[in-house]
Image (tube, helix red, strand yellow):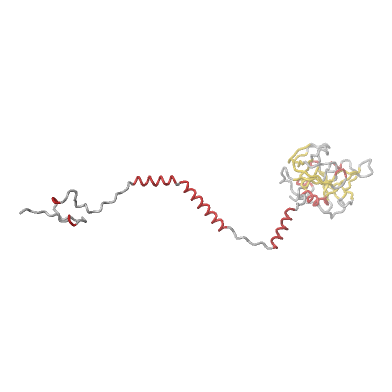
Amino acid sequence: MRAHLTLHVYGTADPTLRDVARGDRPYGSFPHVGAPEPPTQPPRRAIRDRIRDLGHRTRTAQLFVASVATAVAIVTIGAALQPKAIPLTPTDVKRAVIDALASSTPKPNVAIEAYDRVKESVVAVRTRTGGNATPQPRGAGFILDTGGTIVTSLHILSDAEAIFVVFYDGAELQAQVLDRQPEFDMAVLGVSAGGRKQATLASAKNLKVGDEAMVVGSPLGLGNGLSVGTVSRLGTLVQPAWGGPPIGGLIQFNAAVYPGNSGGPLVNRRGEVIGIVIVAANELTGVGFAVPIDAAASVAGSNPF
């Protein structure tokens, strides 16, 4: 009796092959014929290359989309942060018109303001010398205090037999010399009547080249006059035209100066006296010099600085 080997095939979908002996199976019939074949795995490198190529081909489009998205985000954020418009009322419009007109109106000239503040404190100085019965214009000065003290230049009083001062309102009084300081070309005068407007003084220590410098005096004896310029140099040393030792530490300025300006005040843009004009050289050159008010006030015993 021949032995028969039966092979049970598991995992096959063909029932005819389950109990067929190995030797009786047809060619090519194996236990795995009916089993599903495993899926084929694509090469990983090929997928990465395709993704990379796709990224390169669409880079321009990606940048465009990113730009559009950024612009939209900025516009959205800006719109959210923008304050809400407030409706204008007729009152608001009227106020805006008034402000616009005010801003377009020219401001007063600083020279006008400076002159208006100091003009009543400036005096004309006249002297009578031998051979002249009538007092002649010599220069200017300014009122230092309400007691009648007046400061002027010393050199304009040379050979004077009598000194007179003419105030802004036209009143004329005889004056006496209270003090002389040749090193500053300065003289202090006194009159019998006081109560007049005194000049406001300002220290010259903070002056700078280019600051406004205005001369108020009695040019050619014609009464108060104004010339405007700037500080052109500080600490100048000059030799006076009338003789004597050099005078140092002077304020040099380029405002026009004339005979009759000597002894008058040099003022800043606020009308404050910063120096005493001495016009050390030719009085028609347009270059002037002034003694700083700090030194002059100390000599007069009235230094507020």
Front in this rendered view, residue 288 or 96: 96
Residue at 17%, 48% in the rendered image:
27
Position above or below: 258 against 13: above
Quarter holding the N terminus? bottom left
User: Where residue 21 sits in the image (x, y, percent)?
Assistant: 13, 53
Q: State the image quarter where residue 280 is shown.
A: top right
Residue at 80%, 46% in the rendered image:
265
User: Where residue 91 sits in the image (x, y, percent)?
Assistant: 70, 63
Front in this rendered view, residue 236 or 88: 88
25 to the left or right of 261: left
Residue 179 appearing in the image:
no
The single residue placed furthest to the left in the displayed view is 1
21 to the left or right of 188: left
User: Where residue 281 sits in the image (x, y, percent)?
Assistant: 81, 37
Position above or below: 238 against 36: above
Q: What is the count of numbered marks?
A: 0
Front in this rendered view, residue 30 or 245: 30
Residue 208 appearing in the image:
yes
